């Protein structure tokens, strides 16, 4: 009897599922996408209803042949790619490829990889959702059009190699506007006054100046602070008010993709990319110590806080057993999903409360355990009772001055027994570290005379807007309706890899080129890269998936405004390019013409205005370059190993390096250790590190830092991620106008990275 074929994306998922379905099923992996748009051209037939011209991904011919052969020998085919739009598109391509060999094709969705869930999905198959496929296709078409039509505009205006992305550019706009707001911020001085008080029966306690003459206390200068201090020291104080009340704090909803990324960042310092990679591993399946393979969490790309009734009841029973009945709410907690959410999946939660984090810890890596415990705790806490606090607010008055202190003491821990705030979250919300633990003397009562023991005045300055972290950027993107759960990690990664922004101390800093690209795109494509337009396009994609809007109409609403803008800009590229050129007072030492500051692939540089007749150019990193002065090189404190003269730091077209101070008499030079970040351990010599380098022609490549002892080199950037197909130690990343892909140098695995 013929067997049934189940096709999944991931070899890991295939391995887990094969243990559930038994010998009547063949489980095979497509290793991701099998079709994609071509790299060498637009690949969209605009005149023919925006029809994509898909081609087979390089290296996937053998995969397709194997799937076709297996489908021809199988009774039934179940396509079980990921339960989202991208997974639906992959399922559609697979169905197109194998359809001639077997027409009995079904779609199944595994929202969790557990034995019961997998069997239930196989027993209740559905059809491939053409509308979801259209929605994903529309996203790819929009992104491809922007990449192929807007990026060349940047090449002409600034320099070749820059890129624009439909969502990436809007994310960069957020970072750029915040960068400008920080740069333009003018700190405002203010003074805070804190008094130390004591009643006859109480211990000392502190309170801050709250009001002056019944109005908000605003003390702007040191002289004002001194005057107030002098007057306050003359006043007689008493407790004018003691207000005690019970306050509650409710637990948050179980995780969705964006909140998981935010909490993993603030609590564990995971970046968005790492969070999604580890979550994928937990979803696809972990082999436990007893030999059982199981997916520990539900699907991790979701914008819904909905949870199944069975999971809720299991959580309530667990809470009752582990914490007691007082921690279980009278009725199950219900959370509302945002109107803009697709609501295709449940929230991210453990697939079973049978596998508590401690019991499976030995089977998990350190990162897997941390993320699983975070997801577990958040889900359990979401069904627990609220935390209860006794909050006391005390006002101390004297003359025209009123001081206030608020203390809060935990009366009932509730969900905080499982899931409290991280310190970073408290800081982000403006909560003092001791706000929730400050204790006030119990003896305080209205009317009591109060002695002022000490008075401290402190100078402060208002702070600029906080820089975006990965977590806060994702939160802002979600709040503006920009992008969707599956795109956040890719957006953040792309901005850094294309050097539009830098991450320092986990905060985004816009680079000069990032600011310039942003200014040009936002000024010239105001509608296409506006927050409202981008959010509206996301809503339109949702409506395509729901069958509410036709594919062609949505793409028309995107394409025609873009073309109109591009046509308008055709004759303005020269003007825009000139606007980026900065004049200087420096004269070219070769021809006497004025020097100007231009943009190039390696940033801004000083060039002769008589170019191309005179090709004189030099780095702006020389402190005297713009003034026309020759700066003395910085000494390293070491001597040249060749001639014994001092070594100095220099700047070249490819960055900072060390050379002999007598150059060109002595031509000794060396790279600066630590300037280049190692990417992977060298797989050839096992001793060196592979880092970014440049060839004599200026082309970037990646080679071992032990050269010439080791000649290992690559043209594509190595990424320290194991291949999910063959477990090779690294992947190769390549970026073209068509997008960014990662492939395995050892097998045919290849995957596209979201813009």
Image (spheres, grey):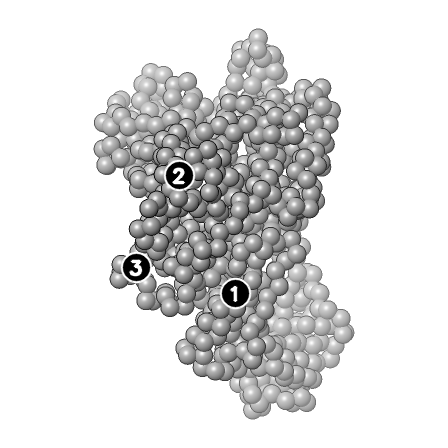
Which of the two residues, 249 or 217, is positioned nearer the viewer here? 249
Sequence-wise first label, 3 or 2 = 2
Q: State the residue at coordinates (68%, 60%).
A: 221
The quadrant holding residue 60 is top left
State the CA–CA distance, disc 2 to disc 1. 34 Å
Sequence-wise first label, 2 or 1 = 2
- Residue located beneath label 3 in the image: 292
Q: State the residue at coordinates (60%, 52%).
A: 342
Is residue 263 in view from this perspective? no
Query: Looking at the picture, does residue 323 appear above or below residue 433?
Result: below
Is residue 111 in view from this perspective? yes
Query: Looking at the picture, does residue 208 appear above or below residue 660?
Result: below
Query: Looking at the picture, does residue 110 appear above or below residue 689?
Result: below
Q: Which of marks 3 and 2 is in front?
A: 2
Asked if the residues shown at circle 3 and circle 2 are in contact, with their CB atoms under 8 angstroms apart, the answer is no
Q: State the residue at coordinates (38%, 59%).
A: 115
Q: Give the percent coordinates (x, y) of residue 600.
A: 54, 24
The quadrant holding residue 30 is top left
- Residue located beneath label 1 in the image: 308
Residue 294 left/right relative to 203: left
Query: Looking at the picture, does residue 3 appear above or below residue 424?
Result: above
Q: Residues within 10 Å of mark 2 (few under 14, many from 20)?
A: many
State the CA–CA distance, disc 3 to disc 1. 24 Å
Q: Which residue lies furthest to the bottom in this view?
A: 201
The local secondary structure at tag 2 comes to helix
Q: Give the percent coordinates (x, y) of residue 328.
A: 51, 78
- Residue located beneath label 2 in the image: 71
State the CA–CA distance, disc 3 to disc 2. 29 Å
The quadrant holding residue 140 is top right
Q: Nearer the viewer, mark 2 or mark 1?
A: 2
């Amino acid at each position: 009897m013929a067997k049934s074929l189940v096709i999944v994306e991931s070899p890991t998922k295939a391995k887990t599922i094969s243990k559930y379905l038994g010998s009547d099923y063949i489980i095979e992996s497509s290793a991701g996408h099998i079709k994609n748009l071509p790299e060498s051209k637009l690949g969209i037939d605009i005149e023919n209803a925006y029809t994509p011209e898909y081609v087979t991904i390089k290296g996937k011919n053998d995969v397709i042949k194997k799937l076709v052969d297996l489908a021809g020998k199988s009774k039934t085919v179940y396509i079980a790619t990921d339960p989202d739009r991208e997974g639906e598109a992959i399922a559609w391509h697979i169905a197109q490829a194998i359809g001639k060999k077997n027409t009995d094709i079904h779609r199944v969705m595994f929202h969790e990889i557990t034995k019961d869930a997998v069997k239930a999905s196989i027993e209740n198959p559905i059809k491939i959702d053409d509308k979801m496929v259209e929605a994903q296709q529309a996203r790819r078409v929009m992104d491809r059009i922007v990449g192929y039509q807007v990026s060349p505009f940047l090449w002409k205006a600034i320099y070749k190699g820059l890129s624009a992305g439909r969502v990436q550019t809007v994310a960069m706009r957020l970072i750029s506007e915040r960068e400008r707001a920080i740069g333009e911020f003018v700190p405002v001085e203010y003074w805070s006054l804190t008094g130390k008080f004591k009643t006859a029966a109480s211990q000392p306690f502190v309170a801050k100046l709250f009001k002056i003459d019944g109005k908000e206390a605003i003390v702007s200068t040191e002289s004002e602070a001194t005057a107030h201090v002098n007057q306050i020291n003359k006043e007689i104080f008493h407790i004018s008010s003691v207000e005690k009340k019970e306050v509650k704090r409710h637990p948050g909803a179980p995780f969705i993709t964006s909140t998981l990324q935010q909490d993993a960042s603030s609590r564990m310092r995971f970046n968005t990319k790492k969070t999604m990679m580890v979550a994928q591993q937990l979803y696809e399946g972990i082999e436990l110590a007893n030999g059982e393979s199981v997916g520990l969490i539900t699907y991790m790309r979701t914008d819904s806080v909905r949870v199944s009734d069975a999971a809720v009841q299991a959580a309530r029973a667990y809470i009752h057993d582990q914490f007691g009945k007082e921690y279980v709410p009278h009725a199950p907690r219900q959370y509302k999903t945002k109107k803009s959410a697709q609501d295709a999946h449940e929230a991210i939660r453990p697939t079973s409360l049978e596998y508590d984090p401690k019991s499976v810890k030995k089977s998990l890596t350190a990162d897997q355990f941390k993320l699983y415990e975070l997801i577990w705790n958040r889900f359990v806490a979401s069904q627990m009772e609220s935390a209860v606090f006794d909050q006391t607010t005390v006002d101390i008055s004297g003359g025209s001055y009123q001081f206030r202190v608020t203390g809060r003491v935990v009366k009932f821990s509730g969900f905080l027994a499982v899931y409290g705030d991280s310190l970073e979250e408290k800081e982000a919300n403006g909560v003092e570290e001791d706000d929730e633990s400050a204790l006030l003397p119990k003896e305080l009562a209205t009317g009591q005379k109060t002695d002022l023991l000490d008075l401290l005045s402190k100078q402060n300055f208002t702070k600029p807007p906080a820089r975006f972290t990965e977590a806060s950027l994702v939160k802002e993107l979600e709040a503006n309706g920009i992008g969707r759960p599956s795109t956040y990690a890719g957006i953040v990664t792309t901005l850094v890899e294309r050097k539009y922004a830098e991450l320092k101390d986990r905060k985004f800093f816009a680079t000069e080129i990032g600011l310039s690209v942003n200014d040009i795109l936002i000024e010239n494509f105001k509608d296409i890269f506006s927050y409202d337009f981008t959010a509206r396009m996301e809503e339109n994609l949702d409506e395509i998936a729901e069958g509410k809007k036709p594919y062609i109409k949505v793409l028309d609403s995107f394409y025609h405004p873009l073309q109109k803008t591009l046509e308008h800009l055709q004759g303005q590229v020269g003007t825009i390019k000139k606007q980026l050129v900065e004049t200087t007072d420096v004269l070219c030492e070769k021809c006497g013409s004025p020097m100007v500051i231009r943009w190039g692939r390696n940033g801004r540089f000083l060039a002769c205005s008589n170019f191309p007749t005179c090709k004189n150019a030099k780095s702006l990193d020389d402190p005297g370059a713009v003034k026309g002065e020759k700066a003395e090189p910085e000494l390293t404190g070491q001597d040249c190993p060749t001639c014994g003269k001092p070594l100095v730091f220099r700047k070249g077209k490819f960055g900072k390096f060390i050379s002999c101070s007598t150059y060109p008499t002595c031509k000794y030079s060396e790279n600066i250790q630590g300037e280049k970040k190692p990417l992977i351990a060298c797989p050839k010599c096992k001793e060196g590190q592979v880092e970014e380098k440049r060839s004599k022609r200026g082309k970037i490549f990646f080679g071992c830092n032990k050269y010439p002892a080791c000649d290992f080199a690559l043209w594509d950037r190595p990424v320290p991620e194991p291949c999910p197909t063959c477990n090779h130690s690294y992947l190769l990343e390549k970026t073209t106008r068509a997008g960014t892909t990662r492939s395995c140098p050892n097998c045919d695995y290849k995957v596209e990275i979201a813009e």
